[in-house]
Image: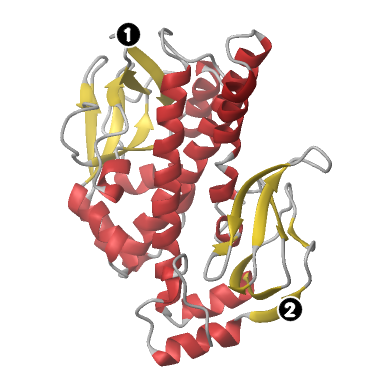
Amino acid sequence: MTIDGPGLQVLHGLKLTELDAFMAACIPAQVPAGTLLIAEGDEDRSMLFVRDGELEIFVGQPPHEVVVGRLDRGAHAGAVGLLRLVDQRMASVRTRTQSDLLVLERAGLERLDSDGNSVVSNLEVDILHALIERLRELTNHLVRLTEGRDSLPSLPGQSASVWARMRRYLVGEDEPEEFEPDVAEALQICPELRGLSPEVLELLLPQLSPVAVGEGERLCDQDGDVGDAYMVVSGRIGMYRSTRLGGPMLLAELGLGDLLGIEGIIDFGSPLGTLVALEPSWLLRIPKALCGEAVVMRTPVARTLRRAMMGAAARRLQVTTRRLVQLGTTQVHEGKVAGEEANEVLRLALSSATALC
């Protein structure tokens, strides 16, 4: 089997038995050039590994599609769908040349997972790093595109009233709880942390602690050290970025179930922004060391947190992509950017599809 390559680190370090099991779980396919493999908007749960040949990722429909990436020998595509990190594919994939592929479907992944095959953890870590890398890249472009603003405009259908309605549904009141939340109940707010086994809960709960923050309290600074991560249990947290014009810009409002401060833990970079409580809030502190273990270890707790961080990063990347497309399109229509600059803005926004197809 020759499936090694610069993009396929998920097979590195596997035992021979694990490699054999991976091959048995995949479906081999010889596919001619021009074949549509993944369609934007699909809800399928499968991914592709390229043994030989070349694929391209594109968004939109012919003849107006935009190619945003290419894949060659050793690369893979479609993992976020396979791992259920997105409801629908955000891009399409087709072959550019005759290609030799391996297809891994959800049933095969679950079989490998139940057997404890290391390829599943390797794949999760690979996708987590890719999501954070793209999130950081697009956030930086978003800040540059919005120099001079105090905050970003709200996306359609997304406002403080949404969080208020969610609070009423989940905790039964409009205002943040005055009493300390129960940690086990608080975990139910995050989709990836619901329904954990008693064994995982027994190991995880003692390491988490509720933290009350007052309005205006800072959790981290954009240029400061990376600290612990947090999950929002009630209230709202603002993410701010300093700009070249000097003033801070409100980049995002984060609410129920959002994970904060994970980016620098994962990629050893600086915090993505300065985090400030916009109102009295309860958070769940997740120690930095515990999050770090989630990136490199294969214990049940590490895998639980890794999957929560993947889900949070995928959701944030989708929102950031929508904002960048919205702002880029608006500035083109307003004549603030034109020509090659306009094309570059929209290309950068659409490029997130390479991580979300």
Residue 119 visible in the current orientation:
yes
Q: Is residue 169 above or below residue 4?
A: above
Q: Is residue 324 above or below residue 279?
A: below
Mark 2 is surrounded, within 10 Å at the Cα level, by few (under 14), some (14 to 19) or many (20 or more) other residues, namely: few
The answer to whether the residues at label 1 and label 2 have Cβ atoms under 8 Å apart is: no
| Kind of residue at disc 2 | Gln
Secondary structure at badge 2 equals strand
Say few, some or many: other residues with alpha carbon within 10 Å of mark 1 (under 14 / 14 to 19 / 20 or more).
few
Q: Name the residue at 33% across, 15% down.
A: 243
Q: In the rendering, at what x and y percent does residue 299 appear?
A: 30, 69
**Residue 188 visible in image:** no
Left or right, 208 with respect to 68, comes to left
Answer with left or right where residue 322 lies relative to residue 214. Answer: right
Task: Give the farthest residue toward the left.
Answer: 225
Tell me what residue is drawn at x 26 percent, y 52 percent: 291
Residue position marked by numbered label 1 in the rendering: 245
Residue 5 location, x and y as percent? 47, 72
Q: Which residue is mark 2?
A: 30
In three-dimensional space, the C-alpha distance between marks 1 and 2, rounded to whole angstroms, equals 54 Å
Q: Nearer the viewer, residue 27 or 245?
A: 245
Q: What colour scheme does the image use? A: secondary structure
Q: Position of residue 177 (x, y in %)?
A: 34, 25
The amino acid marked with disc number 1 is Leu
**Vertical order, 290 against 169 (above or below):** below
